[in-house]
């Protein structure tokens, strides 16, 4: 049985009642985790009120079955509620559009795990061969937001799995996406990264406290053990000692102070005069924020190279 909805005198959507046994999940669906308690609550609502919003499906060629495009959670709850048929919007849909719709639907759910969100975005990026900017435009997000989400994939899986979605104030001691942003900066130091994650959870550090802790460790990794084992008041003293903002040398001083040792060293030294020319006091707020992000990325790259140099030097 089909019901046709009309819009401005033209047929807009055709809703069919389809046997629930003819509907199958999409194995490529980005969402993998379904909270059983939440599903049971939805199933109870469906038993009482029926399924108010139809799911979207697409025909599977050469069969009588339909693959879910959006609405898998409603389909699972309807099965728990023992419904025999479901109202479905049936659409012929290209893979690229199907992936986009699935990801957009999942991104709109507050209980979607951040790591699932990151894997979904990476999936559409790889499947459709898109840049981060193109993915952001397709999903209606900023490029920076997409970059932050994808950064979760660079974390060790056990840390990434522990990160919770935080649309509202998260419970103290939980790892949030903001915490993860700072933990990512310790990727060159996996052991320290795990220790900091434990400190966040055990000491219930907020994101600002985490930023200071990570910055101090990155500034003086050889003092990491001292920093982590210090009492909070002692740690604040260490922060004041380590995190005083250094001044960028004047352009002429940069060139005179450092003598090039090699082609690789010269490439680094060539950047210093460019940095010295930046006048932070004259930057508007949006440019200042962008500069901070760029400098953090540069700092990470420098520290990663320095770490590689130190490891290499230890073998000489």
Image (cartoon, rainbow, N blue to C red):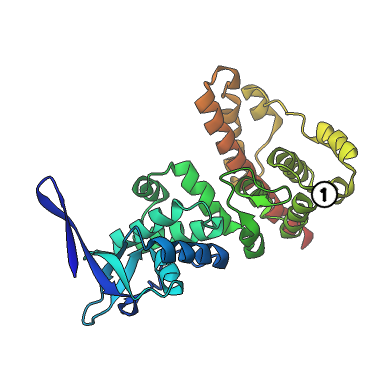
Res 18 quadrant in image:
bottom left
Q: Residue furthest left?
A: 9
Q: As displayed, is residue 262 above or below residue 37?
A: above
Confirm whether residue 142 shows in the render.
Answer: yes
- On the rendered structure, is 232 left or right of 60? right
Confirm whether residue 129 shows in the render.
Answer: no
Towards the viewer: 293 or 108:
108
Residue under the point 42% across and 50% down:
132
Q: As displayed, is residue 107 above or below residue 247?
A: below
Q: Quadrant of the C terminus?
A: bottom right
Q: As displayed, is residue 285 above or below residue 88?
A: above
Q: Residue furthest top?
A: 282
Disc 1: CA contacts within 10 A as few (<14), some (14-19) or many (>=20): some
Q: Residue furthest bottom?
A: 63
Residue under the point 47% across and 48% down:
146
- On the rendered structure, is 254 left or right of 229? left
- On the rendered structure, is 77 left or right of 169? left
Q: Percent from the top left, x then y, of residue 292?
A: 59, 33
Towards the viewer: 206 or 282:
206
Res 243 quadrant in image:
top right
Q: Which SS class for mark 1?
A: helix
- On the rendered structure, is 295 left or right of 144? right
Residue under the point 57% across and 37% down:
293
Q: Percent from the top left, x then y, of residue 235?
A: 86, 39
Residue under the point 59% across and 30% down:
275
Q: Quadrant of the N terminus?
A: bottom left
Reading the image, the residue beneath label 1 is 224
Q: Percent from the top left, x then y, of residue 126?
A: 40, 62
């Amino acid at each position: 049985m089909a019901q046709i909805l009309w819009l401005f005198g033209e047929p807009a959507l055709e809703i069919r009642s389809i046997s629930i046994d003819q509907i199958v999940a999409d194995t490529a669906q980005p969402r993998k985790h379904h909270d059983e308690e939440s599903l049971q609550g939805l199933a109870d609502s469906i038993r009482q009120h029926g399924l108010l919003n139809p799911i979207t499906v697409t025909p599977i060629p050469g069969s009588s079955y339909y693959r879910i495009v959006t609405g898998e959670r409603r389909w699972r709850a309807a099965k728990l509620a023992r419904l025999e048929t479901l109202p479905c919007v049936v659409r012929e849909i290209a893979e690229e559009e199907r992936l986009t719709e699935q990801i957009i639907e999942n991104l709109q759910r507050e209980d979607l795990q951040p790591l699932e969100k990151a894997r979904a975005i990476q999936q559409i990026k790889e499947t459709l061969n898109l840049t981060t900017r193109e993915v952001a435009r397709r999903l209606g997000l900023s490029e920076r937001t997409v970059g932050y989400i994808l950064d979760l994939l660079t974390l060790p899986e056990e840390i990434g799995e522990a990160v919770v979605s935080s649309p509202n104030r998260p419970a103290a001691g939980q790892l949030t996406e903001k915490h993860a942003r700072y933990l990512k900066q310790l990727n060159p130091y996996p052991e320290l990264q795990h220790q900091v994650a434990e400190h966040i959870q055990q000491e219930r550090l907020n994101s600002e406290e985490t930023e200071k802790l990570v910055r101090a460790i990155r500034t003086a990794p050889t003092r990491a053990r001292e920093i982590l084992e210090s009492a909070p008041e002692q740690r604040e003293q260490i922060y004041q000692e380590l995190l005083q903002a250094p001044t960028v040398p004047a352009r002429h001083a940069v060139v005179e102070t450092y003598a090039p040792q090699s082609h690789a060293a010269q490439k680094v030294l060539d950047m210093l005069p460019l940095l010295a020319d930046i006048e932070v006091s004259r930057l508007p707020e949006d440019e200042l924020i962008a500069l901070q992000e760029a400098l953090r990325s540069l700092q990470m790259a420098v520290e990663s190279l320095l770490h590689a140099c130190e490891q290499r030097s230890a073998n000489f």
